[in-house]
Image (cartoon, rainbow, N blue to C red):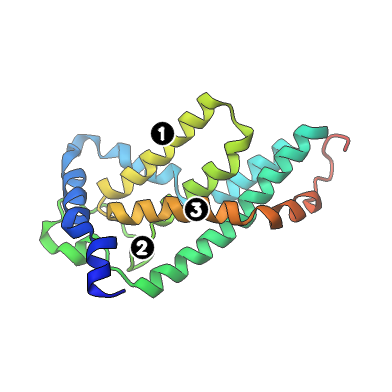
Amino acid sequence: MGDWLRHWLYDWGGANADIFLSINSALPDGLIWLPEALTWLGSYWGAPAAAATLWLTCRSLSGKELAAARLTLGRFLVGLALAMTSGAVAKMAFAFPRPWNALGDRVFRVVGTPDSHYTLPSGHSTYVAVLAAALWPLLNWPARFALLVFAVGVGWSRIALGAHFPADVLAGFVLGWVCVAAAGPLARRVAPRIPLAGGAAR
């Protein structure tokens, strides 16, 4: 990415770093458990548990409800594979440094050790966006609102812990939603083939 494009599309004319520093320094040390808990709950390492929960839900349903739940599981699996692969490629392609490398001692708080040296997009934000986009059609509005609050909280936690800039979080949200939308046609083909041996009558 050219310097001019990066300055305006990623650095936001300096606002990306300024917003990061404001959020990163705002949380009192006594509340550090909150972003740590949100980061843990929103980790992509939880994907197998989420997939297993959806699969078990499918086993308890039948008819139209089963078809909808199966499609949700298909969107989640295909969307997640597409999003995490795309995210890994983007991190290597852009090679944007983590906040502590970019800002040095201006970073107020860094907690934990990320699994990548690069920062765009946020893997946690990508994952929760995939989860939210996949589950969205199945949920009522109160549940959708709660899921959005959770997703935003996970994104905020990555900034509060010093792992990502705001632009990384937004990029992860966009990537996750786009990949689930793009996965729709393939998910509709995969969903009926997901084995549910031992479940309710089909």
- Mark 2 is surrounded, within 10 Å at the Cα level, by few (under 14), some (14 to 19) or many (20 or more) other residues, namely many
- Displayed quadrant of residue 23: top left
The amino acid marked with disc number 1 is: Val
In the image, which disc is placed on residue 149? 1
Where is residue 1 drawn, in percent x and y? 31, 74
Quadrant containing the C terminus in the rendered view: top right
131 sits to left or right of 123: right
Confirm whether residue 62 shows in the render: no
Q: Secondary structure at mark 2?
A: loop
Residue in the picture at 52% in, 66% down:
85
In the image, which disc is placed on residue 176? 3
Where is residue 3 drawn, in percent x and y? 23, 73
159 is higher (above) or lower (below) than 118 = above
| Dot 2 or dot 3, earlier in sequence | 2
| Dot 1 or dot 3, earlier in sequence | 1
Q: Residue furthest right?
A: 201
Calculate the distance from the C-alpha at mark 1 to the C-alpha at mark 2. 22 Å
Viewer-closest of 2 and 41: 2
Where is residue 71 drawn, in percent x and y? 71, 45
- Mark 1 is surrounded, within 10 Å at the Cα level, by few (under 14), some (14 to 19) or many (20 or more) other residues, namely few
Residue in the picture at 47% in, 29% down:
145
- Displayed quadrant of residue 198: top right
Calculate the distance from the C-alpha at mark 1 to the C-alpha at mark 3. 16 Å
